[in-house]
Amino acid sequence: MSGDSAAVASFAVTDYVVFALMLLVSAAVGVYYAWVDRGQGSSGDFLTGGRRLTALPVSLSLTASFMSAITVLSNPAEVYRYGANIGYYGLSYAMTMVVTSEIFLPVFYRLAITSTYEYLELRFSRATRLLGTVLFIVQTILYTGVVIYTPALALNQVTGMDLWGAVISTGVVCTFYCTMGGLRAVVWTDVFQLGVMVAGFLSVIIRSVVVQGGILPVISDSRDGGRLNFGDPLRRHTFWTITVGGTFVWISIYGINQAQVQRYVSCKSVTHARLSLYINLVGLWSILLCSVFAGMCLFSVYKKCDPWTARRVSQPDQLMPYLVMDLLGDYPGLPGLFVAAAFSGSLSTVSSSISALAAVTVEDLIKPYTKMSERHLAWTSKGLSVLYGVLCIGMAGLASLMGGALQAVISIFGIIGGPLLGVFTLGILCPMANSKLMIHFHSPTSRPLLADSWYAVSYLYFSPIGTITAVSVGLLVSLLTGTQHAFCCGIYILTNKQMFLCSYLFAMYVSGGWKQKVVSRLTLMKEDTNLYHLFRLVKDRVSAVAERQSQMPLTNIRNDCSLCALPPFLEVARRTGELDLATGREKSGSTNRAFCDVELDLTKCSFPT
C-alpha cells in the first residue's frame, strides 16, 4: 500500500481537537501553578521550584527536555536512510548517567547554586563565569530555533498550515506556561507531554505492524535492506562515533547544561536527584527504542517506493508525518495525536530552554550587579521568559539554513558544549588548575593543514575534541608551571561537504601549579561517589565478619565449619576430657583459648637413653 497513492489524507476536525486539547492542558498547568504559587514571590521559587521536587516528576522532565521533536521526527528518518546504528545511543545514555551522577551532580547539589555557571566564578573567576553564560545563551537560542522550526515543518507537511504560523504558535504557548508557572509548571507539563510523545509513537508503530503483518516482517525487511548492519565502519554512525562522541555530547547536556542541572538540583535531597537521573535513563531507553523501531517501520512500509526519491517530501524530517497521514489518515484523531506528540517534544524542550535562559540571566548578569529585592527578581525572571520566548521564535528562521535537524542540533552542542564541558571537568577533577579561558570563533581565509585528514571527521566528534583539548591544555600547563603563562591552541573542525571552518583559539592563563589550593567543596571528593560508599560498605562487612571469627571460641568454630570436624578417635578423647591439655595446668603466656601455653611435667616422661 503505502507509497502508491498520489496524495495522503489531510487533517480532520477530530485531529484538530486532539491537537488543541494538548495545547490547552499544557497552558492549564501553567495557570494552575501560577495560582498555587501566587504567595511565593522569590526568584528561587520561580526558577528552582523551592528545591522540594521529588525524583519521579523530575526524571520524566529530564527525559522530555531533550527528547524533543528532533527525536520524534529526525531519529526515525535517520534509521530509514542510514540504519539503526543510533541504537548505540543506549550505551551513551548509560555512561552519561553514571558520570553525571558520580562527578557533576554531587558538586552542584552541595553548592546549592541556581546557575551552573556560578560555579565557574567560585572555582576560577568572574570573567570565566560570564564567558560560560554568554556561550550557553548563544548555544541554547540556536538549539531552540531548530526545535521550534522542526515540528512546524511537520505541521506544514501534514496539514498545510502556514509554516511561520506554526512557529509562532509553538513559541507563544510554551512561553505562556513557562512565564506563568515557573519551573514547577515546566516540570509537570513535561510529564504530560512525555506521555503524549510515547502515545504518538505507539500509534504509528502499532498500525505499521498491523499493515506489515507483524513485528517479524518489519525486522526482516530492515535486515534485508541493510538497516540492521551495526558493524559497518563506513557508515556515518558507527559504534565508536556514537558511544564515544555521543557520550561526550550527552555529558555536556546532563552534566553541565543549565536546563538539566536546574532540574535535578531542585530535588529535595541528593538521593532524589541521583534517583531522578537513573529513572530518566529508563525513559531515554524507552523513547530511543520507540524512535528506532518507528524508523524500521518506515523502511518496511516504503521499501519499494521511497517518498524521498519520489519527491513526495521535500525534507527527510517530513517522512514520519507522511507515513502518519498515509497509514492513519482513515482513523480520525490519530494523525492529530502524532502531531501533538511532535509538538509536545518541541514544547517541553523550548520551555526548559526558556526557563534556563531566564535563570542564568538573573543569576549571572543581573543579581551580582544589582540590589533588587526577591520579588523584583521574580518579576524580572518572568519578563525575561517572555523576552527569550520572542527571541527563540525569531531564531527559528536560522534552522531552515542548517540542513538536517539531527546533525544541526548535535553540531551545536558539540561546537559550543565540548569546550564548556572541558572547563567544568578541569575545575572539578583537577584541583591544581586555576584558569581563565577565552574562546574566539573565526573563519580562516586559507585552507588549514589538517583539512585534508580531518575532512570527513564525524560531527559527533566535535564535542570530545573540544573537551579533551580544553582539559589537556589546562592540565598540562597546571602541572608544568607555577607562574602565569599563556598558551594558545587552535582546533579546526571541517563539516562534511563544506569548506567553512570553525576554529577555536584557547588562551589559557594558568597559575598555581602544584601549590594551588582549592576549597574542597568546589572539587569532587571521594565521599561524593557511590563507588566510595560501596567500597566502605564491603570493607566494613568484611571487617565485621573477621572480628566475629577472631572472637569465636574454638568449639564454636568447629561446630560452624564442617571442614574442621575432628576425627572420631579425637572426638572420643575430647568428650572424656583426655584431649584437654590445659586441665589441671597453670596457664602462662597467651590467653587466647585456642592457643594456650602450659607447663609440661617432664618427671612423668621417660626418654630412651
Image (cartoon, helix red, strand yellow):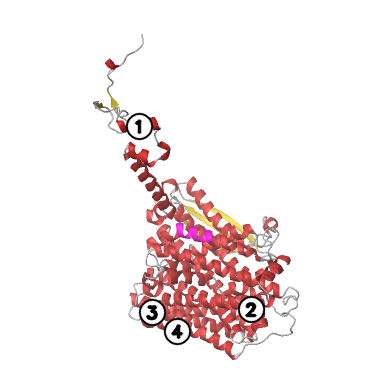
Name the mark nearer the viewer: 1 or 4. 1
Q: Earlier in the sequence, mark 1 or mark 3?
A: 3
Q: Which mark is residue 28?
A: 4
Name the mark nearer the viewer: 1 or 3. 1
Q: Quarter of the image holding residue 167?
A: bottom right
Percent x, y for residue 151?
59, 79
Name the mark nearer the viewer: 2 or 1. 1
Q: Nearer the viewer, residue 37 or 3?
A: 3
Q: Mark 1 is on which residue type? A: Val
Determine whether, in the image, residue 46 is placed left or right of residue 6.
Answer: left
Residue 544, compared with residue 585, is above or below; it is below
Q: Earlier in the sequence, mark 4 or mark 3?
A: 4
Q: Mark 3 and mark 2: span between their CA atoms?
A: 48 Å
Examine the residues drawn in magenta and state their main secondary structure.
helix
Q: Which residue is mark 3?
A: 379
Residue 506, compared with residue 1, is above or below; it is above
Q: Secondary structure at mark 4?
A: helix
Q: Secondary structure at mark 3?
A: helix
Percent x, y for residue 317?
65, 75
